[in-house]
Amino acid sequence: MTYNVGHVDRLIRMMLGVALLLSGLTSGGFWGWTTALVGVIIVITGMAGNCFIYSMFDISTYCPPRKRS
């Protein structure tokens, strides 16, 4: 798997996704469930380290670790 989401980006995605998920679940209704679904998608992309929108536009915030000698 090719990573295109960096560490800081992943952390922000995870926090934002959980906030949207909880906000959507507490709101209820159509927009609440839509917000919760968007939060789940953001959390999944953060956990996987790969964003399909970044892939479409050839964007990457991932910096591979340096090899130690």
Image (cartoon, grey):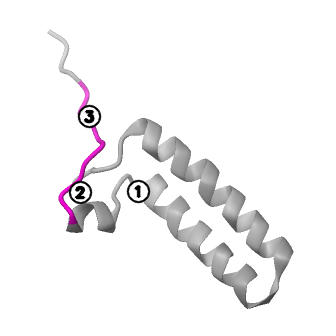
Q: Position of residue 25 (x, y in %)?
A: 79, 74
Which of the 4 quarters of the picture holds residue 34?
Answer: bottom right
Query: Which quadrant would the C terminus be assigned to in this image?
Result: top left
CB contact under 8 Å: marks 2 and 1: yes
Q: Secondary structure at mark 3?
A: loop
Confirm whether the magenta stretch covers residue 23: no
Does residue 40 lie above or below 47 as drawn?
below
Give the residue at the far bottom of this rendering. 30
Where is residue 16? Give x, y as percent: 62, 54
Which numbered disc, 2 or 3, marks the residue closer to the eye?
Answer: 3
From which residue to which does the magenta span run? 57-65
Q: Is residue 65 above or below residue 17?
A: above
Q: Residue furthest left?
A: 69
| CA neighbours of label 2 inside 10 A, class few (<14), some (14 to 19), many (20+) | few
What is the secondary structure assignment of the residue under circle 2? loop
| Picture residue at 61% right of the left edge, 67% below the top | 39
Left or right of residue 63, residue 16 in this image: right
Q: Tell me which residue sits at (74%, 80%) in the image.
A: 32
Q: Which residue is mark 2?
A: 1
For image coordinates 71% across by 57% down, the residue present is 19
* Residue occupied by mark 3: 63
First in sequence, mark 2 or 1: give its number.
2
Q: Position of residue 57 (x, y in %)?
A: 21, 63
Residue at screen point 23% across, 57% down:
1
Q: CA distance from mark 2 to mark 3?
A: 15 Å
Horizontal arrangement in the rendering, residue 22 relative to residue 5 (left or right): right
Q: Main secondary structure of the magenta part?
A: loop
Q: Amino acid at mark 2?
A: Met
| Closer-to-camera residue (35/14) | 35
| Sequence-first tag of 2 and 3 | 2
Task: Identify residue for label 1.
Answer: 48
Horizontally, residue 8 falls left or right of residue 56, namely right
